[in-house]
Image (cartoon, rainbow, N blue to C red):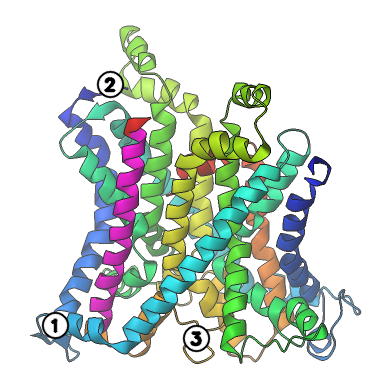
Amino acid sequence: MNKTINQKAWFFVVPVFVLVAFNAAIPLMTVVNYSFQETFGNNVFAWEGTRWFKQILLSERFHDALGRQIAFTFIILLIQIPLGIGIALTMPKKGWGVPVCLILMSMPLLIPWNVVGAMWNIFALPDIGFLGYSLNAIGFDFNFTQQPGDAWFTTILMDVWHWTSLVVLLSYAGLNSIQPAYYQAAEIDGASRWATFRYIELPKMKKVLTLAILLRFMDSFMIYTEPFVLTGGGPGNATAFLSIDLVKMALGQFDLGPAAAMSLIYFFIVLLVCWVFYSLMMKNEVKS
Amino acid sequence: MKKYKWLIPTLYIIFLMLPIYWLINMSFKTTTEIINTYSLWPREFTTENYVKIFTDSTWYMGYVNSITYTVFNTVISVAAALPAAYAFSRYKFLGDKHLFFWLLTNRMAPPAVFALPFFQFYSSVNLFDTHIAVALSHCLFNIPLAVWILEGFMSAVPKELDETAYVDGYSFNRFFFKIFIPTIAAGIGITMFFCFMFSWVELLLAKTLTATEAKPIAATMTRTASTSGYELGLLAAAGSLTIIPGAIVIYFVRNYIAKGFAMGRV
């Protein structure tokens, strides 16, 4: 659409600008303030320069949390994206099955995140939970509150349960936008199922898949509530991802300076990755 | 191969329903039964947990609080986003692209980063523990989202619609409210759905900004889980009830949900 140049349009944007600035800029400035200062309470501050940033960047604790976070996000993407595409491909395209699938599959997305955590906690408990009990019954020594490996398994399974539907819905929307003519052409050419997927469906889904990867990256990188309720970051620090570690530092130990520095580093990482994705997306859009 | 295609979505849905079933199953059991026996369905069926929730004000007020700030937030987000999305879809102005990306970056900020400053900020303006504080703080991610979805829907409406209306002598306000808003009603519905959804499921900020008066149900649940031992039956019942509002809104937008997700979620 060719847009008219109109500087007065700013008036339309003012409410949004004020509300978001009120919510984002002021708290962000507070964080920036803390990150350069030492506080002794009673609003007494001393300038610390980049000390907290150096401390965080060099601390083993941060490296470990970041490492766990990257591993978690990577595993999540590796499972959810192919699984989501697979389910979207096999979903019914018309008839009564469509609304049934859509409604049931969206369910996990609308459950408050701590309820998701609590639900999986109950579900995975080794003595009274279906998952934990069944795994033990068939001979696995499963206890997610004691064994780090089991805690990881449960956290990942929970995230797959919670968010795969998002990938499914996005892929499904992408598949639905493909004209039937493409499939007819493929059939006339005698294309195999794999060829149809590789050369018709996958390219057409490229845009929604980029979006899906971006969203899953962002949300899994910021994950807090579900693992907090499920495992509390434990056993030990086994599932203490970045957000959990950050909240522990800021609200638990009240180490405001280091916590603020960590917040900014954390935000910067997310922003950087998203910016790369966003630019790629926009580049594709211009091309097509 | 083709014959067994239904198997994959079916298995997936069963996987999705299992934990939900388990939660509901637990909610109809007595606490002693939960702790002492493992059973696939309630042996001593009881609604005692639900009765407790609906008669104890600390419990049911949690739902009222959650719904209150969620509705506030949805109204504020959509009302503020409508003119802004119109501006982004129709006009070019100084800094429009940068502003748009800046809005999106707020959707990318980890809420954990904002928890502490929000707490201090809302305390200092005496809004701590009010519904409006939570509603405003959720604007952080819901307004960018609303602008993004609405912009998508508005850009799909041809500009000729605006021009014809002006030629016919409509003022901007009359055009906007009488013609334009009804045209994109479906888009507004979907936007409201997403705002509702993200405000409803968020807990970290809602919990940080409230103490007693505006405490969300989700936070009430964490309190019970940690202090009075494990009242699992009660917890399960409260959890089961939080699924209902979501299920209701999904039902209303079922035909648009796939499309809405594709256009909207950032």
Q: Amino acid at mark 3?
A: Ala
Mark 3 secondary-structure assignment: loop
- Residues in magenta, as a range: A258-285
Asked if residue A259 is among those painted magenta in the image, a careful observer would answer yes
Q: Is residue A254 visible?
A: no
Q: In the rendered view, would you say B250 is above or below B66?
A: above
Q: Which residue is mark 3?
A: A238
Pointer 2 chain = A
Q: Amino acid at mark 1?
A: Gln
In percent of the image, x 68 and y 26: which residue is there? A187
The label nearer to you, 2 versus 1, is 2
Mark 1 secondary-structure assignment: strand
Q: Residue lying farthest top?
A: B168
Q: Position of residue A106 (x, y in %)?
A: 64, 52
Q: Position of residue A111 (x, y in %)?
A: 61, 62
Q: Is residue A274 visible?
A: yes
In the image, B92: left or right of B214?
Answer: left
In the image, A40: left or right of B189?
Answer: left
Inter-mark Cα distance, 2 to 1 = 49 Å
Label 1 near label 2: C-beta < 8 Å?
Answer: no
Label 1 near label 3: C-beta < 8 Å?
Answer: no
| Mark 1: few/some/many CA within 10 Å (<14, 14-19, 20+) | many
The label nearer to you, 3 versus 2, is 3
Dividing the image into 4 quarters, which one contains the N terminus of chain B? top right
Q: Which mark is residue A37?
A: 1
Q: Which mark is residue B71?
A: none
